[in-house]
């Protein structure tokens, strides 16, 4: 059980079904921690999903699922919104201003619909396909950098202001994979000279206590990512898809610590 402070305001028990390497799960864990909410955590084996997960999320059959007082809610962004609605006074994540709230949601869609898939494509490909995906990642990071420099988030320490907010949680839980993917693929994604404000934001985000408590150790993430990439490149044609498939530690020798996603295309959003 996590440290309790705030549950009394809405006392039904909270339970989270998640997976240790899932950035969507991390979003919810981080929001719960930021809000100081006690919750029970149940680790799901995504290679052999529990009857409970299939029953609670029959639509997508994915983690995270939050159960509050016996009622289940899937989808990380929906869950974050619910936590903010159910505990509005406790460390609000969305801004008070209606327009700023809408803007935070817009950039959350950007994170899930554009940036995340582009990063996933870099990870899951090699050669020219990967080069095209890297260009997409850089184009998307340039859009964020411009917002931090001259746009909606100008002059802010975090996207949420002085404190981390909704967009920080959504964007931050996922962005730590950038460094892991850089290491595994050998491709530079976040150049501090090209994206100084995004780079500085990510370092500040990663330094927060609640974030450090949430994100798994980097060597564990690396081992997992190497295993998944090996599997993905194998599915895509192994060495024919690119030379480094054979250089990565064999999935059999160093199996991912959690079951890899069922389909190669899932990797875009599965971490
Ligand atoms: N849009 C969902 C995505 C959740 C998701 O993709 N979860 C992955 C783990 S990171 C999963 O459960 N994958 C299992 C599967 O696809 O079968 C969210 O935001 O919660």
Image (cartoon, helix red, strand yellow):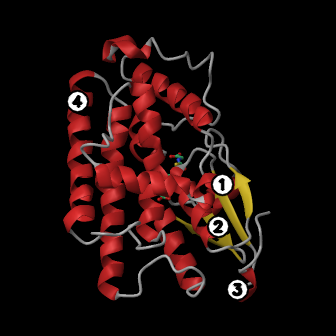
Question: Could you tell which of marks 1 and 2 lies nearer the N-terminus?
Answer: 2
Q: CA distance from mark 4 to mark 3?
A: 49 Å
Q: CA distance from mark 4 to mark 1?
A: 34 Å
The quarter of the image holding the N terminus is bottom right
Front-most of residues 15 and 220: 220
The residue that disc 2 covers is 33
Question: Could you tell which of marks 4 and 1 lies nearer the N-terminus?
Answer: 4
Image side of residue 238 versus residue 226, left or right: left
Is there any visible trace of residue 28 in the rendered image?
yes
Q: Is mark 1 within 8 Å of ligand 1?
A: no
Looking at the rendered structure, the secondary structure element under dot 2 is: helix
Asked if disc 1 and disc 2 are in contact, CB closer than 8 Å, the reply is yes
Q: CA distance from mark 1 to mark 2?
A: 9 Å
Front-most of residues 269 and 141: 141
Q: Return the x and y of residue 38 as percentages of the image width and height.
A: 74, 70
Q: Return the x and y of residue 160 as percentages of the image width and height.
A: 41, 72
The residue positioned 43% from the left and 49% from the top of the image is 175
Q: Is mark 2 within 8 Å of ligand 1?
A: no
Question: Could you tell which of marks 4 and 3 lies nearer the N-terminus?
Answer: 3
The residue that disc 1 covers is 213
Front-most of residues 68 and 171: 171
């Amino acid at each position: 059980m996590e440290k309790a402070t705030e549950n009394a305001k809405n006392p039904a028990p909270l339970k989270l079904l998640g997976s240790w390497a899932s950035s969507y799960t991390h979003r919810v864990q981080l929001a719960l921690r930021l809000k100081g909410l006690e919750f029970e955590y149940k680790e799901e084996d995504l290679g052999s999903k529990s009857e409970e997960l299939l029953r609670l999320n029959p639509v997508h059959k994915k983690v995270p699922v939050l159960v509050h007082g016996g009622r289940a809610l899937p989808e990380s962004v929906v869950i974050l919104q619910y936590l903010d609605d159910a505990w509005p006074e406790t460390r609000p994540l969305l801004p008070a201003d209606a327009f700023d709230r809408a803007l935070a949601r817009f950039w959350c869609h950007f994170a899930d619909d554009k940036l995340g898939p582009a990063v996933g494509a870099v990870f899951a490909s090699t050669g020219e396909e990967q080069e095209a995906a890297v260009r997409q990642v850089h184009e998307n990071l340039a859009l964020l950098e411009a917002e931090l420099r001259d746009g909606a988030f100008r002059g802010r320490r975090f996207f949420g202001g002085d404190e981390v907010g909704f967009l920080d949680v959504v964007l931050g839980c996922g962005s730590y994979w950038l460094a892991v993917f850089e290491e595994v693929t050998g491709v530079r994604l976040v150049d501090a000279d090209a994206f100084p404000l995004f780079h500085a934001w990510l370092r500040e985000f990663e330094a927060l206590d609640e974030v450090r408590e949430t994100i798994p150790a980097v060597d564990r993430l690396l081992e997992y990512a190497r295993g998944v990439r090996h599997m993905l490149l194998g599915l895509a044609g192994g060495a024919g898809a690119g030379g480094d498939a054979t250089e990565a530690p064999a999935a059999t020798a160093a199996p991912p610590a959690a079951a890899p996603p069922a389909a190669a295309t899932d990797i875009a959003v599965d971490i």
